[in-house]
Every structure is written in C-alpha cells, then in structure tokens.
Image (cartoon, rainbow, N blue to C red):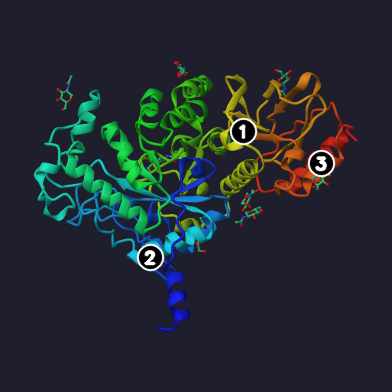
Amino acid sequence: MLPSLVLVSLLASFQPAFAATAEQWRTRSIYQIIVDRFALEPGAVVNECVLSEQTWCGGTWKGILKKLDYIQSAGFTAIWISPVNQNYQGPKSAYGDPYHGYWSADISQLNDKFGTADDLKALSAEVHRRNMYLMVDVVVNNVMATSLTPDYSTYMFKDAKYYHPYCAVDFSNITSEQQCWLGDTKVPLPDLNTENSEVIAKYSDWISDLVQTYSIDGLRIDAAKHVRKAFWPAFAKSAGVFCMGEVFDPLVPYATDFQGSDALDSVLNYPLYYALVAAFTLPGAQNMSALIDNFDQSKTGYSDTTVLGNFLENQDLPRWHNLSVDPQSLYNAMTVTFLTEGIPIVYYGQEQGFSGAADPYNREPLWPSNYTNTTSYQLMTTLNQLRTYMINTTDWATQKTNVITTNQNGIALQKGEVVSILTNIGAPPQNFTYTALKSPWPQGTVTIDVVGCRQFVVASGGYLEVEYTKGGVPVVLAQPSSLNGSGLCGSTMEALHANTLPGQTVAQSSALDRAVVPSLIALLLMAASLGLW
Ligand SMILES: *[C@@H]1O[C@H](CO)[C@@H](O)[C@H](O)[C@H]1NC(C)=O
Ligand SMILES: *[C@@H]1O[C@H](CO)[C@@H](O)[C@H](O)[C@H]1NC(C)=O
Ligand SMILES: *[C@@H]1O[C@H](CO)[C@@H](O)[C@H](O)[C@H]1NC(C)=O
Ligand SMILES: *[C@@H]1O[C@H](CO)[C@@H](O)[C@H](O)[C@H]1NC(C)=O
Ligand SMILES: *[C@@H]1O[C@H](CO)[C@@H](O)[C@H](O)[C@H]1NC(C)=O
Ligand SMILES: *[C@@H]1O[C@H](CO)[C@@H](O)[C@H](O)[C@H]1NC(C)=O
Ligand SMILES: *[C@@H]1O[C@H](CO)[C@@H](O)[C@H](O)[C@H]1NC(C)=O
Ligand SMILES: *[C@@H]1O[C@H](CO)[C@@H](O)[C@H](O)[C@H]1NC(C)=O
C-alpha cells in the first residue's frame, strides 16, 4: 500500500470522540430516538407500522445518519439513541418483539436488527463531524426472558449465579426494587446480581469497550434506581463519559439520591415532568404550586440542577398531547424544559404533535409525518437557538432560575438575561391579563419576545403585563442588546427597535404561528391605531 493510501485509510477509520463530561453536556440539547421508529433507510420498503403489533418497523442506524439534518436544523446538539446491544432472539413474546431495544440478552454483541458495527461507527463519526454528541442507552439492571427459569447460555452472563434469585418487585421496599425482577411472569426481566464481583468486573470491561469502540460521548442508564447506588461510581468511571440515570419516580428525594459523586452525574428530571403535567395539562389540575414546589425542592435537593435531563415525553410515558390536546399547553411546558436549569431533551415525534398513549402507542413511526417543519419544530428551533446563543455569550449554562411571580394561571421565570412568562390558560383567546410582573429591568427598557418577535417595553416601576387576547402563548423576553448577532427575530428586531416609545407597554399577543410577518403588520397597525408613533 502506498504511504498516502495508508494515511487515507487511517484517517477514514479515525473516530474523533468527545468522551464528554457533565460540564460539556450541560451546554447541550438532546433529541431522543427509538432507532426502530425514527427513520428508514432511503429506498427501504415502507410497511405499515401497526403499534399494537409491537414488532419491528424498520428504522436503522443508517436511517438516522441520513436524517441528521432534520435534528440539527432544529438546533439540537446531541442525540440519544435506544439500546444498541443484542436483545432477546426468540419467538414473539406476550408483549411483542424487542423493537425498542430494552430486552437485553448477549450484550457483548450489537443488535443486528439496526445495522452493523460499521453502520454504528459511521453514525457516530457523522454525529461528531457535525460537532454533536452521541448518547447511547444502556440496560445494566436486567436482561429479558420468557420464563422464570431461563437458559442463560445465550446471554453475556451465562450462569444463574450472576443473577438475583427470582422474586416479584415490591415497590414499597427499595431492597426489593433493587434485587427482585422487574417485568412479570409472562416477560420476566432477570435481575443481575450487581453485588457480585465478577458481574461488576465484567460490566466494567464491557462498558469501557463499548464506549471506546463506538466513540460514545454519554450514557443514558435504564432503570438506574433498580441497581444499588454504590454500584454506579465505578461503572461510570469505567465508561469515562457523562452518565444520566433513569430514576422513574415523581419524588425529588429519590431523584436527588442518585445524583452525585456517590452515584451518577445526572438523572432524568421525572419530578419536573410530573410538576409540569400538574401545572400545564388541559384539562388538568392547573396547579402552578406544584411547579414552584418542584423548583424549591430541586434547589436544595440536587447536587447539580444544571445537568438534569428535562423532558415532557419519552418511550415510557403517554405523549403530552395524549394528556393535553391543547397546543399552547405543550408550548408553554416545553419552554420550561428549555429555559430553566438542565439539559433539554425532546423525544422524537414531540415536534410532530404525536398523541399516542403509553407503551406501545407512544412509539409511533416518524416517517409518516414527512418530517414536517411544524409549529412545534419551529418553537424548539427558536428555544435551542436562544439557549445556545446565551450559552455562547454568557454564563447561562450555570445560571440558576428565579421565580419572579406566579398565580394560578401564570408563572414568570428569570434565568440570566431572559425572562419567560408562561401560562396554562391554553389556546383559546381569553380575557386574562397577567399583571404585576416585576421585571428585572428599569422603566422604558425595550425587550423582544423571541417567540412571537414582538416588542415589550417595561412600564413604570419595572412592571410588565401580558394580555392573552389571542390565546395563552409563551412569551420569552430579552433585550435586543443581549440578542445581537443571535439571528433571532431577524430584521424585525431592528424594525421594532426603531419604533420604541419608552414607558409604554406593548402587550398584544399573537397566536404562535408561522405568520410572523402578518402578525408583525397587525402589531404595527395596532400600535399605529393606539397612537404609539
Ligand atoms: C425487602 O425486600 C427484600 C428483598 O426481597 C427482602 O429480603 C426484605 O425482607 C424486604 N423487607 C421488608 C421490610 O419487607
Ligand atoms: C398542588 O401541588 C401542591 C404541591 O405539590 C400540592 O401540595 C397540592 O396538594 C396540589 N393541589 C392540588 C389541588 O392538586
Ligand atoms: C391517547 O392515546 C390513545 C391510544 O393511542 C388514543 O386512543 C386516544 O385517542 C389518545 N388521546 C388523545 C387525546 O389523543
Ligand atoms: C406525507 O406525504 C404523503 C405523500 O405525499 C401524504 O399522503 C401525507 O398526507 C403526508 N403526511 C403529512 C402528515 O403531512
Ligand atoms: C421552518 O419554517 C420556518 C418558518 O418558515 C423557517 O424559518 C425555518 O427555516 C424552517 N426550518 C427548516 C429546517 O426548514
Ligand atoms: C454557538 O457557538 C458555536 C461554536 O462556536 C457555533 O457553532 C454556534 O453557531 C453558536 N450558536 C449560536 C446560536 O450562537
Ligand atoms: C375583561 O375583564 C375585565 C376585568 O375583569 C373587564 O373589566 C372587561 O369588561 C372584560 N372584557 C371583556 C371583553 O369581557
Ligand atoms: C449590535 O451590534 C452591532 C455591531 O456590533 C452594533 O453596531 C449595534 O449597535 C448593536 N445593536 C444593539 C441593539 O445592541
């Protein structure tokens, strides 16, 4: 081989890995993917994907690679993909086939349903070429079986001595949660004995190898709460990358327990999810106190709120629109996940307004949506752009969220240079004005709502008010000087800036829609009719 060809082939096989830390992940924004359901390879036969069949629909790692533009164009800087390791190989179980990837068997191998080792390496390389991170979901707590006495010879851990003996989980007993078997008698999930030193050593080698072979930048750890906490630090050290654990529980104290030097870098913010459901779903409890309560408990409970994983949907929960069809309830709650402390996570399909109930109806194929540039997609794009710009230009990533005011139907939050004014009144126009919003800015300060590209001028005493005569849209304010160069609201910012009249609150609401230009014209006409200039 000619030396130059050697060099070329060396370069071609070189996988730049970020092996990213918690500090690096803090600035990221994650798009979560169920590999089987996100994208088909170009030219693949499109079969109907019947969710109740609980079987494969054809998505692959190569399919994801070809659709990264769709993710990156919305401003996401990382992807989290469902488990990549080999799963249960037998006939269809009582709950279908392991299309989701969570039914581990021989995890020393890859899952060939989703592609080859080279396909996964190519995806990793392309993600890195785009300066994005790759997070891979791993299942450590358990494997899957179809009987209580499985033949372990086909698993990576090949002997019953590596597993806890069977018992059904008693969810009121933490030892039972960590040592008994999840699942049920039809599809039991044999629980690894993570106290066993051979299991610990083998897992350590396995994760180190997996991370290095595929240049993985972070891990999402399934059922982290179901493994004794003391197992995690050494496992995470072997992985050498950021680890975010699943602690599926509404209570803040459970979640906080699994974050820290004696556990994992981060956890998925389930308590925030439940609080957002309580505060924003329509119909729903409309309980803003639940959100305040969550912020208060989080502030003192977690060792680091800025790396928590904030989400509204995932593969285990009903879609937001299954709980709440109102589009504005989604937009307002989603704004909280992006603009408070933590790493925003969007589950594929959230941007397409999917509305399936819990498993298996929340794992819709994405391709029938045609990957449309929807209103939700545009809102995420805006929120990602604002957040990343603030991270680039200020210490946003480590800044804390302050609650400015709250009432039954609204909450105003400040983080750094940004004030988010959110409401749970929903899409129908209402005669509701959110008043007594004491902004951090002096009278006359001009601010821009980056969601609606409208101007708000701070009134006397530093107060702002928002009218919802066109429905309960999220309002996200920052001063033009803090947005300079962000590309947000484009030239409209200059146009609005030219028409400033200090001391005046311009507080019209427009529905969050694509018609920025018509609504801007309407705004200017309204301002003209009010004699604002
Ligand atoms: C909790 O579960 C463990 C494991 O199954 C069991 O040994 C223990 O007796 C249980 N404790 C109580 C109080 O039920
Ligand atoms: C609202 O949430 C708070 C805090 O979590 C809780 O104490 C209260 O009971 C809830 N109120 C209603 C009506 O659900
Ligand atoms: C919730 O999901 C179930 C099952 O997919 C569906 O029948 C129901 O219509 C959904 N509800 C809403 C409000 O979309
Ligand atoms: C996607 O495109 C197909 C073919 O053009 C069309 O039939 C379908 O209605 C589109 N789906 C959506 C959600 O726009
Ligand atoms: C989505 O539509 C908006 C509004 O037309 C546009 O600004 C944006 O560039 C589009 N995004 C993509 C990825 O096409
Ligand atoms: C943030 O900085 C990165 C790295 O310099 C750059 O690629 C990206 O375009 C910036 N994004 C925004 C929204 O400012
Ligand atoms: C809106 O509410 C205000 C204050 O409650 C009231 O004075 C006003 O008449 C209402 N306007 C409409 C159109 O209902
Ligand atoms: C934005 O930046 C440009 C060039 O750096 C400057 O001329 C302009 O005054 C700035 N605009 C605002 C609103 O700060």
Of labels 2 and 1, earlier in sequence is 2
The residue identified by callout 3 is 496
Residue at figure coordinates x 42%, y 65% from the top left: 122
* Ligand 5 is within 8 Å of the C-beta of the residue at disc 2: no
User: How far across and how far down the image is residue 404, in percent?
Assistant: 64, 22
- Frontmost of labels 3 and 2 is 2
Of labels 1 and 3, earlier in sequence is 1
The residue identified by callout 1 is 428
User: How far across and how far down the image is residue 161, in percent?
Assistant: 10, 42
Q: Quadrant of the N terminus?
A: bottom left
Q: Secondary structure at mark 1?
A: loop
The one nearer the camera, 378 or 29, is 29
Dots 1, 3 in contact, CB < 8 A: no
Q: Within 10 Å of the Cα at label 2, are there few (<14), some (14-19), or many (20+) other Cα atoms?
A: some
Q: Secondary structure at mark 3?
A: helix
Instruction: Left or right? Give the position of 379 relative to 528.
Output: left
The one nearer the camera, 273 or 514, is 273
Q: Secondary structure at mark 2?
A: helix
User: How far across and how far down the image is residue 531, in percent?
Assistant: 90, 32
- Frontmost of labels 2 and 1 is 2
| Circle on res. 119 | 2
Instruction: Left or right? Give the position of 282 relative to 150.
Output: right
Instruction: Left or right? Give the position of 154 relative to 429.
Output: left
CA gap, disc 3 to disc 2? 49 Å
